[in-house]
Every structure is written in C-alpha cells, then in structure tokens.
Amino acid sequence: MDRNRLYMLLGDLGILLVALIWGTTNVVIRDALEGITPLWFCGLRFAIAWITVMIFFGKKAFLLPKDTRLKSTLVGMVFICAYLSGAVGLLYTTAGNQSFIISMSVVLVPLSVWIITKKFPGWYVVTSVLLCTAGMVGLMLDVNLSVNLGDLLSFAACVFVTIYILLVQKYVRGVDPYALTCWQAFGGMLLAVAAAVIFEPFPANIPPRAWLALIHTGTIGFALTLVIQTVAQKYTNATHVAILLSTSGVFGSVAGVMFIGEPMTLRIFIASALILAGVITVEAVPALRKKYRERETEAERQLT
C-alpha cells in the first residue's frame, strides 16, 4: 500500500471514529439534560470545547495568518449554524424526520463536489451514496415525512453541514489542522453563546448530571471530534467524509440497544447493513481498482 492510500485510509478511520462518537454521545447523555435550556446547553458546551482545544493547541493558533484565523472562525460559525438550526428545528418536527433530513448531506456533498469540480465522482461513489441513502431511509421508515417549519430548519442544517465539510476540505490544505481547530471552536462558541444570551435566560440552577453531560459533550463530543475531523480531512476527501459520517445512525442504533434497551429490529439491521455496504463500496473499490491496474501493468511488463 502506497503512502497516499495509507494516509487516506487513516483519515477515513478518523472520520469513522467521529461518527461513532456522534452516534453514541446523544444516546448516552439523553436523560442527563433536564434542567438546562437547549441554547445554553449549546453555548456552554462549545465554550468548554474552545477552552479544551486552546489548552492543547492555543500556541499554534496564533501562528496562523490573520486572514486564515478569520476564515477558520467563519467556518466554525457555519458549523454552529447547522447545530442551532437543528436544535430549533427539533422543536417543530420529530427526531426521526430531522435525522433523515440532515443525513442527506451524504447526497449533497458528492453532488456539490461534482458541480464545483465538474468531475464525475465515479459510479462506485454513486452506488455508495445510494446504498447509504437507502439505509438511512430504512432507519427512519416509521416516521411521518410531512413538511413543516421544523423540516425546513432541518434542511437548512443539512445545507450548513454540507458547506462546513466543503469549507474544511478547502482550508485544511497547507494549514496546521490543530490551529485551524482552535479558531473553528472560537467561532462556534461566539455564535452559540450570543444566541443563548439573546434568546434564553441563563439557567438558575444547572444540576450535576447536566454539568457532566456538558463536560462530556464539550470535550469528547465536540473538541475531540472537531480535532479528529479537521486532521482527517487533510488526508481524505469531502465525499468520503459525508459517506462515512452517515454511519453515525448505525452507531446510534447500536448504542440504543446496548445502553437503553432499545430493540434491534429486522428493519434496523437491514438498514444498517445497507449503510455499511455503502461504506465498504467507497473504501474497497478504489483499492481493488488499483490492485487490478498493478496486475495488468505487471502482466504487460512480463510479456514485453
């Protein structure tokens, strides 16, 4: 395996780890959030995340040029726009509807890359996207898909997620990803705290369980995943990121079975299998193609 392929594989594994953390975190801390309003939970969570990344990488952050700092801060704001749109949208739609709509970034990202680069991504990518989409539909099959304000806000979140993935892919090349992470977290914190201050009173009494949830989601659920995703996108591509992040629904379903006793139905099993098949397709086909070309080249060399 050549070095570039190895780095891409490591990057893809990093994105899978992000999907694992995202998919399991909300299930694990779901019952620990009583006593704190959604926007303040978001604001405090991202404040904790920013403090965390600055402790580890703060010195690197100030080595970036000013224009790169500004761009990275705006990228972080785009991510928080996705989060806030989803949080408000959830007040008007079901969790199932929202999960399905936001996960459609698995389609929007490859489509956007195709439009921007004018380069067809390959039929194996199309196949992978279709398998992942079918799997996500299966995971949400029992929800009411009528359109309402919550669905529109959820679609806005999907668009912001797509833009975020594409912007990270654009700016991470040739830049220290750890420094980039610090300014992303800063931008996210600014917007999240501003939204909380404007729209909600500060919670009078935050219970200990909620503080534990804040610390967990701020450090592991956001700071760690932000670092991993930003570093990973230096070595993989936006299409792979979108496809691999679609597995968060699979990990969430498995976590639900393991931690809170949710049933593993045949529908969930088949849907999860389709998503995993999509991931395997996008990972295995390029490697198999390269191996086939190498064999053909070697065979031609022997004939001559």
Image (tube, rainbow, N blue to C red):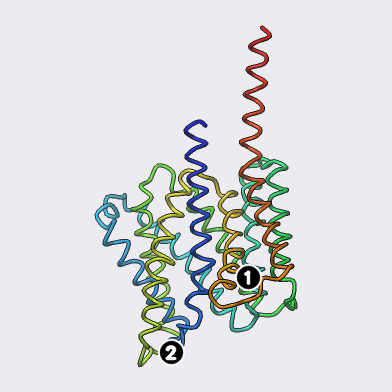
At which x and y percent is residue 194?
40, 77
Q: In the image, is 97 to the left or to the right of 157?
A: right
Image height of 213 relative to 76, above or below: below
User: Which disc is residue 99 wearing?
Assistant: 1
Q: Quadrant of residue 35?
A: bottom left
| Badge 1 or badge 2: first in the primary sequence | 2
Q: How many marks can you see? A: 2
According to the image, label 2 marks what residue?
A: 35
Residue nearest the viewer, comparing 63 with 215? 215
Image height of 144 relative to 235, above or below: below
Q: Secondary structure at mark 2?
A: loop
At which x and y percent is residue 105?
62, 60
Residue at point 32%, 53% (across, down) = 66
Callout 2: few (<14), some (14-19), or many (20+) C-alpha neighbours within 10 Å?
some
Cα separation, mark 1 vs mark 2, equals: 24 Å
Q: Secondary structure at mark 1?
A: helix
* Amino acid type shown at disc 2: Gly
User: Which disc is residue 126 wearing?
Assistant: none
At which x and y percent is residue 182?
34, 59
Image quarter (top left, top right, bottom left or bottom right) of the C terminus: top right
Q: In the image, is 180 to the left or to the right of 137?
A: left
Q: In the image, is 210 to the left or to the right of 85?
A: left
Q: Circles 1 and 2: CB distance less than 8 Å?
A: no
Residue at point 37%, 88% (across, down) = 207
Can you name the residue that lies furthest to the bottom here?
A: 204
Can you name the residue that lies furthest to the top here?
A: 304
At which x and y percent is residue 2?
50, 30
